[in-house]
């Protein structure tokens, strides 16, 4: 092998190695010391990150795909943060939100940098019920770092700690249910902050953003009637394959996952807040029969609708 071939071989090996490092995945399970937590619906982690520390969550040296939703608040100092290959200046008094499967790397941080971060194996904003969730999702993805009010600068870090303290009360009979509700409250708080800070001028969407926005708007009104990706693609005048590809690119979730999210969210609400029978809920969600609904629900949630109702309903 001549010198040129050796150089090319080394270059190829380096590029392959670098690509592998780029696609390393980071999830909250990695920071879980108690094996019992791995069987929970929600795994939550609270971090306090300082500029004096070299590495806390492993995103300082190489980019990682973070398999968790996270909300971070910069208390002091600043850092340069890469999210999905775009670079942002994250500074004191700001909040930053990342969705599941976001590529994250800390490029630089000041010595006085202090940040608190709450991460969970869920997507923040995924389960909230607001009419403009697709617009909000696109807005946050485009501008993940935004300023906090003086009130929120104090309240949100304290709320992070409170959520963590509730989550750690494993002896409490309903600690998981309370944690989920507190996370839901946090989602609405975060949504309100980004909606308030959204630029007043009309936002210009790319074609793919528009497809995603139109899909979610259509889904929000039709999910009780249709669960087929092909149905939504036909109305949007595109192929199911293209719709799935666009939705995955914009949101890191497939069109089918978005449909399941809407159906399951409504099913869980009906199971825990109403006295409707499984048959009635199955009919309302347009399943052919209760047996099919039960199989669908159990495949997604790991338990039957009846078992879910018995373990999570407010008594």
Image (cartoon, rainbow, N blue to C red):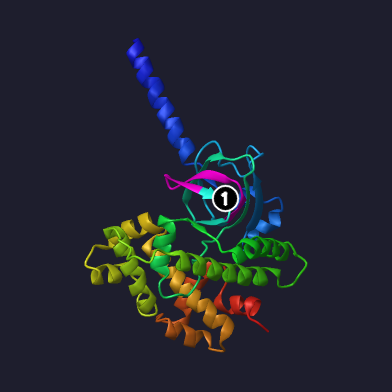
Toward the right, the furthest residue is: 171
The residue lying at 50 percent from left, 78 percent from top is: 267
The quarter of the picture where the N terminus appears is top left
SS for dot 1? loop
256 with respect to 304 (left or right): left
Magenta region includes residue 81: yes
82, 183: nearer the viewer? 82
**Residue 295 visible somewhere in the drawing:** no
157 with respect to 6 (left or right): right
223, 305: nearer the viewer? 223
Q: Which residues are magenta?
A: 72-89
Toward the front, the furthest residue is: 150
Toward the left, the furthest residue is: 237
Task: Identify the main secondary structure in magenta.
Answer: strand
The residue lying at 37 percent from left, 63 percent from top is: 255
51, 207: nearer the viewer? 51
């Amino acid at each position: 092998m001549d010198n040129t071939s050796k150089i090319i071989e080394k270059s190829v090996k380096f590029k392959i190695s670098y690509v592998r490092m780029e696609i390393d995945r980071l999830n909250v399970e990695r920071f879980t010391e108690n094996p019992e937590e791995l069987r929970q619906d929600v795994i939550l982690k609270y971090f306090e990150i300082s500029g004096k520390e070299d590495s806390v969550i492993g995103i300082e040296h190489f980019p990682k795909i973070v398999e968790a939703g996270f909300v971070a608040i910069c208390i002091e100092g600043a850092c340069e943060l890469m999210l999905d290959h775009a670079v942002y200046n994250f500074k004191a008094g700001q909040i930053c939100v990342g969705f599941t499967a976001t590529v994250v790397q800390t490029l630089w941080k000041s010595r006085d940098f202090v940040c608190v971060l709450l991460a969970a194996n869920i997507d923040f904003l995924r389960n909230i019920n607001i009419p403009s969730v697709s617009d909000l999702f696109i807005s946050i993805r485009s501008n993940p770092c935004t300023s906090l009010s003086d009130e929120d600068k104090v309240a949100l870090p304290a709320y992070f700690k409170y959520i963590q303290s509730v989550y750690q009360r494993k002896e409490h009979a309903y600690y998981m249910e309370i944690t989920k509700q507190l996370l839901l409250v946090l989602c609405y708080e975060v949504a309100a902050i980004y909606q308030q800070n959204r630029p007043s001028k009309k936002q210009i969407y790319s074609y793919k953003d528009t497809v995603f926005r139109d899909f979610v708007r259509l889904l929000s009104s039709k999910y009780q009637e249709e669960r087929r990706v092909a149905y939504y693609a036909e109305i949007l005048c595109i192929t199911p394959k293209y719709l799935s590809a666009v939705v995955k690119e914009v949101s890191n979730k497939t069109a089918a996952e978005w449909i399941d999210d809407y159906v399951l969210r409504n099913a869980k609400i009906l199971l825990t807040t109403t006295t409707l029978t499984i048959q009635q809920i199955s009919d309302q969600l347009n399943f052919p029969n209760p047996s099919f609904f039960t199989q669908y629900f159990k495949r997604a949630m790991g338990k039957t609708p009846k078992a879910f109702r018995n373990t999570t309903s407010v008594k």
